[in-house]
Image (tube, rainbow, N blue to C red):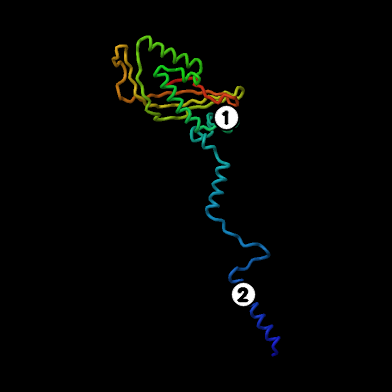
Amino acid sequence: MNSPILQLLVLAGIAVFLILRLKSVLGTRDGYEAPPAERPAADTEARRNFEVIEGGPDHDIIDNVPEGSPAADALSRMKAIEPSFNVGQFLQGARGAYEMILMGFERGDLAQVKPFLAEDVYEAFAEVVEDREKKGLTIDAEFIGVRELSLVDATLDEETKAAEITVKFIGELTYVVRDNAGEVIEGKDGKIKRQKDVWTFERVFGSDDPNWHLVATGE
């Protein structure tokens, strides 16, 4: 056997060996389909969660009122008018407004809270404050905090875009009433009083006024 033929046989043997090795490492596939790459588990989970959130319910609404309820529908329509509206942020603002308005009323200082009160609510508060003054009564009150807060109802007038949201508060405060002689006639120094209030706030969506106004109070 001459040298060129021997070299060809050696090269052919090497080629066959390499092909067999490649098949054992890569496996065999049909056509030109690329081998599938495993997607990282975190990426897969993130995509799945995104798909659920994107097409799922608005938890900003259903975490505060029952899904499918008239209140949920009203809140959804509010968001359609003003996408920046957020129920959670509204409730935080309502918490602050409750303390400010309640303590303004108890201390007889309504001037600072008047811009946030409907006219009839302001007049009702002012009448009580005036009556206290005529009787010589003084109120010593200190706000402790809001123990409970929940959204009771929500409505939206399609024509006027006037929205009303009713919130229940359970607040805690110290409360002492003294007569004109300084004698305590109601409450006790240092004793915490728990108070329940149901307030309704109103605002016209789509208007330039971002403020909510207290339009009704109850227990």
Camera-side residue: 13 or 51? 13
Query: Which residue is farthest top?
Result: 134
What kind of element bears circle 2? helix
The residue that appears at 60% across and 25% down in the rendered structure is 158
Percent of width and height locating residue 209? 57, 24
- Mark linked to residue 134: none
The crowding category of the residue bearing disc 1, from other C-alpha atoms within 10 Å (few below 14, some 14 to 19, many at least 20), is many
- Mark linked to residue 78: 1
> Does residue 101 appear to the left or right of 57 in the view shown?
left
Vertical position of residue 208 compared to residue 35: above or below = above
The residue that appears at 58% across and 41% down in the rendered structure is 55
Q: Quadrant of the C terminus?
A: top left
Q: Looking at the rendering, which quadrant does residue 174 occupy? A: top left
Q: Looking at the rendering, which quadrant does residue 26 occupy? A: bottom right
Percent of width and height locating residue 73? 56, 31
What kind of element bears circle 1? helix
Percent of width and height locating residue 86? 53, 33
The residue that appears at 31% across and 17% down in the rendered structure is 186
Residue linked to disc 2: 20
Among numbered discs 1 and 2, the one appearing first in the sequence? 2
Give the residue type that dot 1 points to.
Met
Q: How many numbered badges does the structure rendering display?
A: 2
